[in-house]
Image: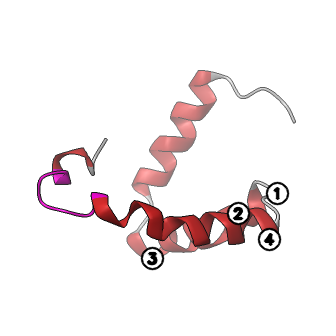
Amino acid sequence: MGYISPMTLITIEKAVRSLKAEDQRKLLRDLPSLINLSMADWARLKAAEQSFAFWDNDQDAVYDRL
């Protein structure tokens, strides 16, 4: 895998921000395959999601945008 320069990463981030919400959701849906994430790794991430549910509260909401 090649090196991505910080400038390229900034360009990608700006492009994602400029997408319509529908296109951002499509990108999010397609991202695991775009970054070659295996189905097994995806399944492990999905299974671990519920372990972080305790952070879904009003006190920690300030961190949601970091």
| Residue neighbourhood size for the residue with mark 1, other residues' Cα within 10 Å, grouped as few (<14), some (14–19), many (≥20) | few
Residue on which disc 1 sits: 36
Quadrant of the snapshot with the N terminus: top right
* Image position of 56 (left or right of 33): left
Q: For the residues marked 1 and 3, what is the alpha-carbon distance in whole angstroms?
A: 22 Å
Residue visible at 50% across and 66% down in the picture? 49
* Image position of 21 (left or right of 66): right
Residue visible at 50% across and 42% down in the picture? 13
Residue that sits furthest to the left in the current view? 58
Is disc 2 in contact with disc 4, using a CB cutoff of under 8 Å? no
Helix, strand or loop at disc 2? helix
Q: Which residues are magenta?
A: 55-61
Is disc 1 in contact with disc 2, using a CB cutoff of under 8 Å? no
Residue on which disc 3 sits: 22
Residue on which disc 2 sits: 32
Q: Is residue 22 above or below residue 10?
A: below
- Residue 27 visible in this rendered orientation of the protein: no
Q: How is the image coloured?
A: secondary structure
Residue 39 numbered tag = 4
Disc 4 marks which amino acid?
Met
Quadrant of the rendered structure where residue 21 is? bottom left
Q: For the residues marked 2 and 4, what is the alpha-carbon distance in whole angstroms?
A: 9 Å
